[in-house]
Image (cartoon, rainbow, N blue to C red):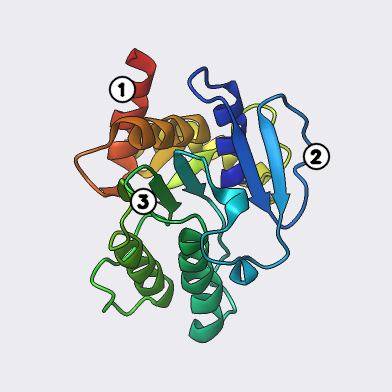
């Protein structure tokens, strides 16, 4: 869901000339800017994969829920896969890496909540790699963008709550357009924080709209 929203905004953005979608299955979309690289298992990608060279930014939006999954498997899918992909794109000072983790991620890696520890370690270790800048994006509730095909099934029951959440707890919600614009802005122009919370996403999105 997040990846599709970011993809749509990236394709529409005037500063972006080419987008490479790396996923396990085709997007089902056609666009002059869009190229696709189908990979069955991200852990199988070689380091310094030539097909991933020539890009300015990585927007890593893959992930799963921790419900019903034990820590070793969750760590393999969340941490190992992300770091393997980061190494495959050849970390360098010319590339920004944006990792979508989630609100509540634990930077100390020592908390009681398993998924938060694993995502915290993922953020921390990405930031140790020699990228231009690596970001841990921590959105909260996200409203889909127009034209999305992949929306979590339970959203049809809760989307009506979005205006209420925005009114009562504005620091718990973003639109996916805001998330995408914030990712593009951070990749292009940097940000003073590596950990980007809901409020920061709003700030970055506003900066992007003002340019």
In the image, taking residue 111 as reference, residue 175 lies left or right, namely right
- Could you tell me residue 160's position as x and y percent? 57, 36
Q: Earlier in the sequence, mark 3 or mark 2?
A: 2
User: Contact, CB < 8 Å: mark 1 with mark 3?
Assistant: no
- Residue that badge 1 annotates: 207
User: Contact, CB < 8 Å: mark 1 with mark 2?
Assistant: no
- In the rendered image, the quadrant that contains the C terminus is top left
Secondary structure, mark 3, is: loop
- Could you tell me residue 133's position as x and y percent? 30, 47
Please tell me which residue is depicted at 56% across the width and 25% down the height of the picture. Answer: 17
Work out whether 73 lies above or below 28: below
- Residue that badge 3 annotates: 92
Whether residue 50 appears in this view of the structure is: yes
- Could you tell me residue 175's position as x and y percent? 48, 33
Please tell me which residue is depicted at 36% across the width and 51% down the height of the picture. Answer: 92
Secondary structure, mark 2, is: loop
Residue farthest toward the left in the current orientation of the protein: 192
Residue farthest toward the top in the current orientation of the protein: 210
Closest to the observer: 63 or 167? Answer: 63
The mark found on residue 28 in the picture is 2
């Amino acid at each position: 869901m997040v990846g599709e929203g970011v993809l749509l905004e990236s394709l529409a953005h005037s500063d972006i000339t080419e987008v490479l979608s790396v996923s396990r299955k085709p997007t089902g979309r056609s666009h002059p800017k869009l190229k696709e690289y189908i990979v069955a298992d991200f852990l199988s990608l070689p380091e310094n994969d030539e097909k991933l060279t020539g890009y300015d930014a990585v927007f890593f939006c893959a992930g799963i829920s921790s419900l019903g999954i034990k820590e070793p498997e969750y760590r393999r899918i969340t941490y190992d896969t992300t770091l393997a992909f980061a190494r495959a794109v050849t970390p360098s000072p010319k590339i920004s890496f944006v990792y979508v983790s989630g609100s509540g991620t634990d930077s100390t890696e020592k908390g009681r909540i398993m998924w938060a520890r694993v995502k915290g370690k993922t953020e921390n270790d990405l930031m140790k790699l020699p990228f231009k800048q690596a970001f841990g994006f921590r959105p909260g509730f996200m409203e889909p963008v127009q034209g999305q095909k992949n929306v979590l099934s339970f959203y049809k029951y809760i989307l009506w709550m979005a205006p209420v959440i925005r009114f009562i707890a504005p620091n718990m919600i973003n639109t996916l357009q805001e998330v995408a614009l914030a990712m593009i802005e951070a990749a292009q122009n940097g940000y003073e924080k590596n950990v980007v919370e809901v409020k920061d996403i709003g700030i970055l999105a506003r900066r992007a709209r003002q340019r």
